[in-house]
Amino acid sequence: MNRRSAIPFIAALIASGNAWGAEKTVTLKVENMTCELCPITVQKSLERVPGVSKVAVSFEAKTAVIVFDDAKARPDDLISATTNAGYPSHLAK
């Protein structure tokens, strides 16, 4: 590959943003959700974590399902986000 043809390839690789990471899904058990508005706070706290692409929070099941880029976030980052918002969580089994 010559230098000229490498530039578009490198630019596309960088622009893809997911070149080095993999999309992962985790489920957290979330504590302290006592009303139907609590999931909104949990969702917003998780959406602020870099690398998170999707969040679904269930008040009934007391869970949060998160899709994220594992090159940008770790499960511990997700747990910290909910805990800092007042809703301690841990990985569901």
Image: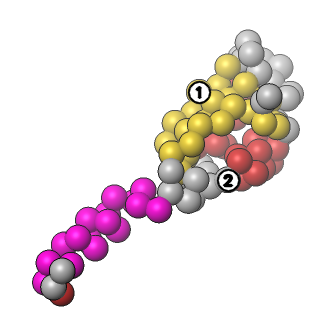
| SS class, disc 2 | loop
Residue lying at 59% horizontally and 37% vertically, measured from the top left: 25
Question: In the depicted view, which residue is nearer to us: 14 or 83?
Answer: 14
Label 2 packing within 10 angstroms: few (<14), some (14-19), many (20+): some
Residue lying at 86% horizontally and 28% vertically, measured from the top left: 32
Q: Quadrant of the N terminus?
A: bottom left
- What amino acid type should be assigned to the residue bearing mark 1? Ala
Q: Quadrant of residue 5?
A: bottom left
Question: In the depicted view, which residue is nearer to us: 86 or 55?
Answer: 55
Q: Which residue is mark 2?
A: 74
N-term mark: 1 or 2: 1
Q: Is residue 25 left or right of residue 5?
A: right
Q: Which residues are magenta?
A: 4-20
| SS class, disc 1 | strand
Label 1 packing within 10 angstroms: few (<14), some (14-19), many (20+): some
Q: Which residue is mark 1?
A: 56
- What amino acid type should be assigned to the residue bearing mark 2? Arg
| Gap between marks 1 and 2 measured at Cα | 17 Å
Residue 69 position in % (x across, y down): 53, 51
Residue lying at 59% horizontally and 49% vertically, measured from the top left: 48
- Contact? badges 1 and 2 (CB < 8 Å): no
Residue lying at 42% horizontally and 56% vertically, measured from the top left: 18
Residue 59 position in % (x across, y down): 72, 18
Q: Main secondary structure of the magenta part?
A: helix
Please tell me whether residue 65 belongs to the stretch shown in magenta: no
Q: Is residue 38 left or right of residue 19?
A: right
